[in-house]
Image: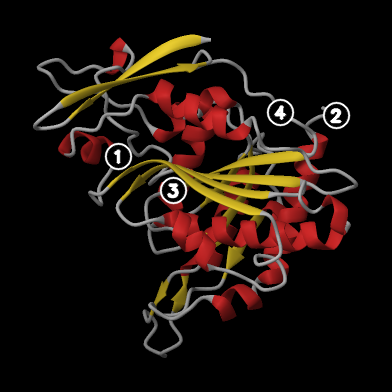
Amino acid sequence: MASVTRTLIRPSTIRTLSYSAPPPHAPLRRRPNHRVHLVFGANTDVGKSIVSAGLVRAAALAAMDVAPSSARALASVNYIKPLQCGGSDESFVMDQRDDSGFERGNIVCRTLFSWKTPASPHLSSRLEGLPVCDAEVLASLRSSLEPIKEGNDGAMTTTIIESAGGALSPSSSSPLHDRSCMLGDGRWGWSTQADLYKSLHLPVVFVGDGKLGGIGVTLASLEALWSRGYQVDAVVFVEGGADCDGTGEGIRFGRGNAEALQEYLMMHRHPSYLDGDSIICLPSLPPMPLALTDWYGSNQEAFMKLHHFLCQRWKESFCE
């Protein structure tokens, strides 16, 4: 185990924390009955937390259906937010409770590193003088995953890891980053979210941009993930729209963006695994701050179908 030192720089003080961690690029141990998916997005505010909460709800309900009472403690559902800037996506996920799954299921939500400033991690970490290097994020994430037990008796333990911002949004800035990230003049460098998690070799649930103009940023982000070797198991769009046709009905761009992605993959004979069953469009959200209980209830079948599809893909990966 390598020893890593983290220096936290604040305006009035400097303190150093030491901890032991595996090498930052050590392979992550994958287990057949513990499914782990990374949730990436085309951009910020496209619905990553909405989709993550839906997947957690579905996994909790599925665990209650499959596992006998004696095995439920092993069929856990986990949500991890490695980097959080302002607010709490962990709290949001936990607030989307469902009596049939959340209250009785074994669900754990956690945030690994957080800043108060609601901005990109690279900026929040600089403004607050709290750098976190990529090696520390990966070490903390691995330490969080290793103790999680596998499901048994047909139950699948599930862990959802939600990234911050878009696939190419910055991670935290730090003076302890690799030299290739350093800028000089005392400025801390950063890497993209896609580069941060690349060494984990985890499959992805990607949340596309369901608004007008979202096709381009969705394709660009997917190409960035594919070029880095990520396996994208599913793409989810949450509909956005506007009253553009003068009828009051509006144009729902999410479904059109999903269809455009399918057409692109077919036209270019793209080698990705994505097909009609793995590109999903969900209806638009109710106006905030209304509760999302009814929205999740009406889309429970879609999330359950996606959950079972992802479980099947996870199991198939051990046979490939």
The residue under label 4 is 30
Residue 47 shows up from this direction? no
- Rendering colour mode: secondary structure
Q: Which amino acid does label 1 sit on?
A: Pro
Residue 32, placed above or below residue 267: above
Q: Which of marks 2 and 1 is nearer the N terminus?
A: 1
Looking at the image, which residue is at 36% across and 79% down? 244
Disc 3 and disc 2 in contact, CB within 8 angstroms: no
Residue annotated with mark 3? 42
Q: What amino acid type is highlighted by mark number 4?
A: Arg
Q: Residue 21 carries which label?
A: none
Q: Nearer the viewer, residue 228 or 180?
A: 180
Where does label 1 land, which residue? 121
**Amino acid under disc 2:** Cys
Q: Is residue 167 left or right of residue 126?
A: right
Q: What residue type is labelled 3?
A: Ala
Which residue is the site of mark 2?
Answer: 319
Residue 154 horizontal side relative to residue 223, left or right: right
**Front position in the image: 35 or 245:** 35
Label 3 vs 4, first from the N-terminus: 4
